Amino acid sequence: LAYLEEQASSAAEAHRRDLEDFKARTSKEIRDHMSVLDKHAMTIQELQSSSACSSREMQSWDVRHHSFCERVDSLENLFRGLADSVSSELRSFKALHDGHEAAHRALGKEVTELRGTVDMSLHKANQATEERLSKWQAVVGETVDNHGRDLAATMSKLDRLGQRVAIWDRQSTESRDSAMAAAAAAGPP
């Protein structure tokens, strides 16, 4: 029983450490992904501000060299690239999240199975202990009964012996008293 408890405790502790390690790795990866997303957001903002400055400069220098459609196309290409990058980051984050959930479900199932095994083992051990205790109670009860009978027989013998000693003591006192009375009646030697 102690071995099973120790095994269950060791397994639970190992699973707890694995889960903590997984959480730490997951949170680090999430932070990394978030920092990449923040960089992309900053890049988008920089591009927007840069684009605004470039547009003003272009208009002031020579608007005729670039058409409005060309500028829109270049911005669309830029944003499309950023969107693809963000989508890729989101897919990897979702895959990481799904892996975490799968590991959590597997760990929960394993803990439930282990708990059931431990409960069953404890139940069997409890039954075996109760059976042994019942046997020992019967043996001790029988031994107590035997000792009680032996004690009663010994007490009975002691009572009879005490009665004999009392009778012998009485007889010896009477014999001594009659011998002394006879010696006193006979006179001094």
Image (spheres, rainbow, N blue to C red):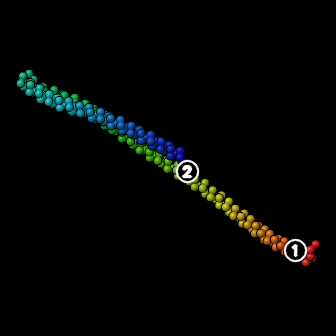
Q: Which residue: 61% across, 54% down? A: 132
Q: Residues within 10 Å of mark 1 (few under 14, many from 20)?
A: few
Q: Which residue is mark 1?
A: 180
Residue occupying image coordinates x 50% and y 48%: 118
State the image coordinates of residue 173 (x, y, percent, origin top left): 83, 73
Going 75% across and 69% down the picture, which residue do you hit?
159
Is residue 80 visible in the rendered image? The answer is no
34 or 114, nearer to the observer: 34
Q: Is residue 162 above or below residue 72?
A: below
Q: Residue furthest front?
A: 188
Determine whether 128 is above or below 145 in the image: above
Callout 1 amino acid: Met
Which element type, helix, strand or loop, lies under badge 1?
helix
Q: Quadrant of residue 25?
A: top left
Which residue in the protein does label 2 denote? 125
Q: Is residue 105 left or right of residue 52?
A: right
Nearer the observer: mark 1 or 2; the answer is: 1
Q: Nearer the viewer, residue 164 or 137?
A: 164
Where, by quadrant of the figure, is residue 147 drawn? bottom right
Q: CA distance from mark 1 to mark 2?
A: 79 Å
What residue type is disc 2 on? Ala
Between 26 and 73, the residue placed more toward the observer is 26
Q: Residue 33, percent across and down?
A: 28, 33
178 with respect to 124 (left or right): right
Which residue is outermost to the bottom? 185
Q: Quadrant of the C terminus?
A: bottom right
Residue 29 appears in the rendering: yes
